[in-house]
Image (cartoon, rainbow, N blue to C red):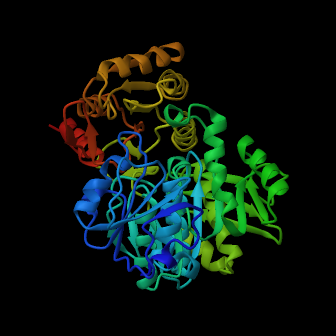
Amino acid sequence: MRLESIIKDLEILEIINQQANYEVKKLAYNSSDAQEDTLFVAIPGYKTDGHKYVGNAIAKGARIVVHQNPLNEYDDRVVYIRVHDSRFALGLMAAAFYKNPSKDMVVTGITGTNGKTTITYMLKTIFEASGKKCGLIGTIHNLVDNRIMDNRGRTTPESLEVHEIIREMRDACCNYLSMEVSSHGLALDRVNGVDFDYGIFTNLTQDHLDYHKTFENYFDAKAKLFYQVKKANIINGDDQWGKMLCEILEEKTDIPIITYGMEPTNDYIARDMVYGVSGTTYTLITPVKEEEIYLNIPGDFMVFNSMAAIINAIEEGVAMECIKKAVATMPGIEGRMERLNVDASFDVIIDYAHSPDSLEKLLQSVRKIYDGRIVLVFGCNGDRDREKRPIMGRIAGANADIIVVTSDNPASENPMDIIHAVAAGVAEKNQNYTTVEKRVDGVYYGASLCKPGDVLVLAGKGHEKQEIMKAETLYYNEWDTAREAVARLKK
């Protein structure tokens, strides 16, 4: 592609060695990916600075460098383009380079502390039931139709990969895209240049404050999504931050706002919930009529997730009967309120809950479904928001009957330091707890405490397949561990 087409939307401060009609074969922000006729984008990062690697990129064949900071030296063979913010510029250039594929799809971005993954899968299920071909970008997988793509461990990839993935989806004739948009992704402009039709806001509770520092910064990052939306913003109207977002958007944009929740002031309201082990029945009050909804995934927080997805589908003209059938028959979502099929006298629930709010909602949902005791096995991540550890401990102590505090990706920290911080919170509410350093042993021990009719809740890992330690990253599978724990009880 011609250079002039790639940089047409940039606010350029300076160009050195300008050349007309330069042909660009590749974009890269990692110098190791550079090759002949590459446009290299130097991005300041948290661990290193891409400006340090400009020379490496040139040595590998880069002939155009986009940068924001002055460079120590300039090569006469290279075109240098200086901008205010090279990370911001990367998204605009990537969109142009891949020919703006999001403009040819209906794209929904979902952000919030909890519920993003579930809503993406619900939307994919509903739209596919209506005959559409769908893509998905998110925490568990990136999907092109039903083909799995590596998400490289990021909920929201870097903007270059985002547009490359969307291009691949469009080339595969995908009509719709449901996309998780993380607060990190928004703060780092990873969805810059994406043409969003809908934005969904789930909620905002404590998480990622190690990165954002304050709730206000966290909220501001989330809010960025909704200024990129063309058709409608779908907001959880029960959430205090959702209400604030509605006020801001009403003042600053002309995009329609649709609210959902259980409070009577919302546009869509859920009531008369009946919770069961296999799913939930509720009445959805729409602006037009009332609908009886059966949701094939249990948990009252899943009601909120389904409402957001249903509203999005209604706005896109999907028939209500098609929507109802889709949510009633959709398969479970990996590590999201997932009931494990085991031959035991007690049930096993696996869930990704790793924030205070998600853990509380998980345990409250389980309490509504089961009459037996809740035996909870969980921990907190290392190198992350330390303030939430005792908070999650108190939530566990208040909502579970027996608690096993164990490891969950301790990373560079001493596992027992994290465990003790969590256990201190548990002890404020409940003395029926144990600490176990290794997660495998914690799951085994939790299973051994279960009696007939109890439910073993394994929280925090969900879909993850690893345990991150200081010296190594180990393979870990919560499902296999739970099944082995049950098998051991029969020996």
Q: Which residue is nearer to you in this view: 298 or 240? A: 240
The x, y position of residue 58, in whole percent, is 28, 61
Q: In this view, does 186 lie above or below 311?
A: above
Q: Can residue 275 be seen in this view?
A: yes
Where residue 143 appears, x then y in whole percent? 40, 70
Above or below, comparing residue 485 to residue 285 in the picture: above
Is 243 on the left or on the right of 24, as rendered? right
Q: How many numbered marks have been drawn onto this rendered protein structure?
A: 0
Instruction: Tell which residue pokes out farthest to the left in this image.
Output: 491
User: Is residue 269 among the parts visible in the rendering?
Assistant: no
The quarter of the rendered structure image containing the N terminus is: bottom left
Q: Is residue 355 above or below residue 331?
A: above
Q: Which image quarter is the C terminus in?
A: top left
Side of 331 relative to 12 (left or right): left
Image quarter of residue 169? bottom left
Residue 222: horizontal and vertical position, in percent?
A: 62, 49
Instruction: Name which quarter of the figure residue 35 lies in.
Output: bottom left
The residue lying at 44 percent from left, 81 percent from top is 2
153 vs 164, nearest the viewer: 164
- Left or right of 388, for residue 24: left
- The residue located at (50%, 47%) in the rendering is 184
Residue 489, position in %: x, y? 21, 36
Residue for point 37% across, 49% down: 51
Q: Of residues 378 and 67, which is closer to you in this image?
A: 67
